Amino acid sequence: MSNRRIFLALSLIVFCATALTAAEPMKALIVDGQNNHKWQETTPVLKRLLEETGLFTVDVATSPAEGEDMSRFKPDFAAYDVVVSNYTGDSWPEEINQALIDYMNAGGGLVIFHAANNAFPKWKEYNEMIAVGGWGGRNEESGPYLRWRDGKVVRDRIPGKGGGHGPQHEFQITVREPNHPITKGLPPVFMHSADELYSWLRGPAKNVTVLATAFSDAEKKGSGEHEPMLMTISYGKGRVFHTAIGHAAVQCASVAFITTFQRGTEWAATGKVTIPVPDDFPGPDAPVVRE
């Protein structure tokens, strides 16, 4: 065989190998098993939403039930490109806590889904990963509230509870960082379906970027403040996407949730977003829900 033919054959092999490598999906892990919300309903939806992008294969690590022995619960975070937490419940063994810290310090990706920001109120590193959280006895000692006032993020250190919401209702979400990969191309204001509008979240609030907020109307038992709904956080070399929306499976059918969750998870895994904004993404007047 001539040198030219050998070169062409090798080039074809390299091209095919590169194409196959580029097509390999990323690995995502959803952690669940305990929650004050119906994780049995939401985990299958989250799994499907990630798989339908074509970018991910998804495994699920389900913890023992509340009060049961946690010693055999050992999710291998390091084997995944991104970890999605759908967990709120008993503390994990210190070994698992350290494994998550090591994973994030090494450049891992983490997604905090709705009530996962209720978890681990006393775990310092976790609270730094999520920036702000609610319930579990959180108060002013946990850190400030994050508010959007006069065109900027304000860290409000007044005393008060950590976490709360009024009755579920439809609400507008306003993009505050339109050039971030997750929110780039989204309408400036869009509607989300009836959901819990988390308010009074507080915590260390370090290395956090507020991507989008929603107004928590006092007439709906809210805070009267523009509250963070979508955030990113830097922790170690890792990336965190924190979404406060998505109470149950019905809320996860909102196109506002679907799109931001998919794009946020891709960003947490890679630092980039290739998932396009869909044609049915809502504007400011009415939510869009997929069957």
Image (tube, rainbow, N blue to C red):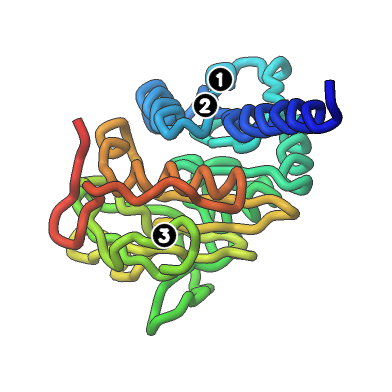
Q: Is residue 63 above or below residue 185?
A: above
According to the picture, the residue beneath numbered tag 3 turns out to be 183
Assess whether mark 1 and mark 2 are in contact (beta carbons under 8 angstroms).
Answer: yes
Work out which quarter of the rendered image holds the N terminus and state it. Answer: top right
Element carrying mark 2: strand
Question: Seen in the image, is 29 located left or right of residue 104?
Answer: left
Element carrying mark 1: strand
Which residue is nearer to you in this view: 47 or 36?
A: 47
Element carrying mark 3: loop
Residue at the image point whose x is 54% and y is 57% from the top: 232
Question: Seen in the image, is 104 located left or right of residue 24?
Answer: right
Q: Position of residue 228 (x, y in %)?
A: 42, 62
Q: Amino acid at mark 2?
A: Asp
Q: Is residue 156 above or below residue 251?
A: below
Assess whether mark 3 and mark 2 are in contact (beta carbons under 8 angstroms).
Answer: no
Residue at the image point whose x is 52% and y is 26% from the top: 32
Q: Quadrant of residue 229?
A: bottom left
Which residue is nearer to you in this view: 124 or 236?
A: 236
- Between the C-alphas of marks 2 and 1, the distance is 5 Å
- Between the C-alphas of marks 3 and 1, the distance is 31 Å
Q: Position of residue 175 (x, y in %)?
A: 36, 66
According to the picture, the residue beneath numbered tag 1 turns out to be 62
Q: Quadrant of residue 46?
A: top left
Front tag of 2 and 3: 3
Of marks 3 and 1, which one's residue comes earlier in the chain? 1
Q: Position of residue 188 (x, y in %)?
A: 30, 68
According to the picture, the residue beneath numbered tag 2 turns out to be 32
